[in-house]
Amino acid sequence: MANDYIKVLDDSKFFIVYAGLIGNLFTIQKTLYERYDKKSETIKNTIETFFEELLMGKKPKFSFDKKTEALQEGLDIRELFVYRLLERLGVGATIQFPTSTVGSKCFMYIAGLQIPNFKTLDEVEREEDDYAHYVHPAIQMLTLFAVLSIGDRHSKNVGVGNDKSPFIIDFCMNNLEVRDLDRDFVLRIRHSNKINNLIDEYSFKECVDIAVDFLKKIGFEKKTDEAVQYFIENDKKAFEENNLHFSQDITDDLKQYIQVVKQNLNKFFAYSN
């Protein structure tokens, strides 16, 4: 849509009459992109077009939540990588990174495949009476928040799939620093008070032991290395092909982030020994 408006202005000789504006064409384009690429309809069209091309003409079913017009901030390579890593660890949705094909290429979206039988912890606490089976998954989710230096531990951002397996579907990035285990392994999920009360019955050491067992079970360190390689060889290449630009060299930024994650991981292992 943004490109359409620019074309109308150009075809109407607008930039000939107002020649002084031609030097600001990029700013005008960017303003229009930011105005129209945030709209829900544009995002929906982008996602549908992307997956129809990916699936060679087949039209999958989509659902869009109420966050489709969220504020578009600068691309954060760490955030994109964490979505990919969660997928590879089996604790996040299978994802794709569609770029805007209806309008400009200034924006990228994150599309996730629906997780079978997924329920957020918010839904669990509203719909069920027995929460004992959700304590370990909740501690496992909180483990990932600490190791990955991510935040927004909200009951609507986490949940369980088949066999009560933990999933994180949304998060925000925290400051890039090595976590202090006693301070940052926060054993609370916002608005999940009933499950939090059961977690309180565990000692901190017991929670760390659950965390370490979980990290070993999912092969966290090996899967992280594999995810980095996949991300650089596939996702980074796709970003470059779509002219998506980051504030600094994304390879160096990603390496720095991985170093912090591995230091966080070692803190858990050291505490557990």
Image (cartoon, helix red, strand yellow):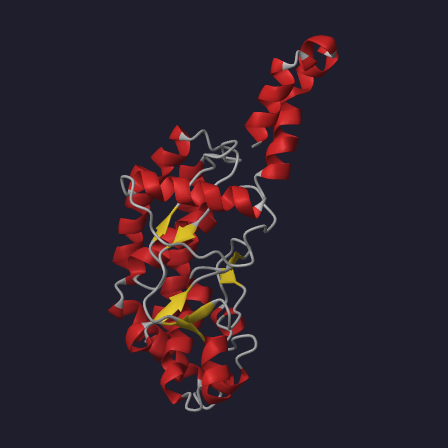
Q: Where in the figure is residue 262, as x and y percent of width and height?
A: 37, 57
Q: Is residue 198 above or below residue 119?
A: below
Judge by depth and name the residue closer to the eye, 94 or 5.
Answer: 5
Q: Residue at x 45, y 34 (%)?
A: 101
Q: Is residue 259 visible?
A: no
Q: Where in the figure is residue 53, as x and y percent of width and height?
A: 32, 38
- In the image, taking residue 73 as reference, residue 243 lies left or right, namely left
- In the image, taking residue 114 as reference, residue 182 lies left or right, namely right
Q: Where in the figure is residue 228, as x and y percent of width and height?
A: 32, 47
Q: How many marks?
A: 0
Q: Is residue 197 above or below residue 173?
A: below
Position of the N terminus, as image quadrant, is top right
Quarter of the image for residue 32 reads top right
Q: Residue at x 50, y 60 (%)?
A: 171
Position of the C terminus, as image quadrant, is bottom left
Q: Residue at x 43, y 60 (%)?
A: 148
Q: Is residue 182 above or below residue 16?
A: below
Q: Residue at x 54, y 84 (%)?
A: 193
Q: Is residue 271 visible?
A: yes
Q: Where in the figure is residue 232, as x and y percent of width and height?
A: 33, 40
